[in-house]
Amino acid sequence: MDRDELRQVKFYLGISLIFLLSMWQSWRELKYAVWGETTTGKVTQVREVSGSRTGTKQLQVDFRFSGVDGGTRSEYEHLPLDAVITEGDQVDVEYLPGEEDSARIEGQSNMSMVYLFLGSLLAMGFVAFRVWKMAHNAVHGTRSRRW
C-alpha cells in the first residue's frame, strides 16, 4: 500500500467514524421528536460548575417536573453562563417517558449533529462508490481515473 492509498483509507475511516457518531446523536434527536413529551417544570437550583471535559464554567440548572406516569422526576441541564434563569422559574421540559436522565430544557436540541449526519451520509455514499469502483477496477483490470 503506497502513501496515497494509506491517506485514502484514513480519510474513509474518518468519514465512517463521523458518520457513526453523528448517527447516534441523530437517533437521540429522533427519539425526542417521535416519543418525547413536553411538560412544565420548576427550577430548583442554579449553580456555576466546571465542565467535566473542558474545564469551562457552565451553569448547572436543576429542575423538577411531573411525567406522564404521574411521578416526579428531578434532573439537571448544563447551560452557558450567560443563560438568564433563576431558581423558581417555570421552564418547558422535554423528556423521554420511562428513560432516566433524558430530560432537557426545551430548546436545547442538538440539530447540528443531525445536519452533520446528513452530510456524512452523503460522504458515505461517495466513499461506498469509490470503494466499489476500486474493487471493480481491481477485478476487471481497468485503469482507475482520479476524481
Image (cartoon, rainbow, N blue to C red):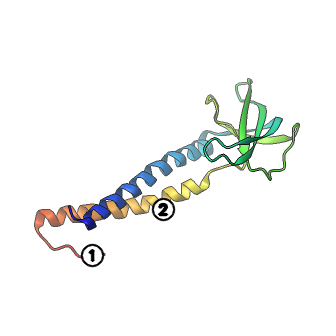
Query: Is residue 105 among the parts visible in the rendering?
Result: no
| 47, above or below 135, in the image | above
What amino acid does circle 1 point to? Arg
Q: Regarding mark 2 in the picture, which secondary structure is present there? A: helix
* Residue 118 seen: yes
- The outermost residue toward the top is 71
Q: Look at 70% across and 25% down and name the residue there.
A: 69
- The disc placed on residue 119 is 2
10 Å crowding of disc 1: few (<14), some (14-19), many (20+): few
Of 146 and 70, nearer the camera is 146
Q: Quadrant of residue 112?
A: bottom right
SS label for mark 1: loop
- The image shows residue 17 at horizontal and vertical percentages of 42, 51
Point out the tag, 2 or 1, that comes first from the N-terminus.
2
Q: List x then y, in percent, for residue 36.
A: 64, 39
Q: Residue at x 55, y 54 (%)?
A: 114
Above or below, 136 relative to 25: below
Front one among 82 and 73: 82
Amino acid under disc 2: Gly
State the quadrant of the N terminus.
bottom left
Front residue of this view, candidates 133 and 71: 133
Q: Position of residue 51 (x, y in %)?
A: 67, 43
Q: Which residue is mark 1?
A: 146
The image position of residue 84, as x and y in percent, is 84, 50
Mark toward the viewer: 2 or 1: 1
Q: Residue at x 87, y 38 (%)?
A: 87
* Numbered-mark total: 2
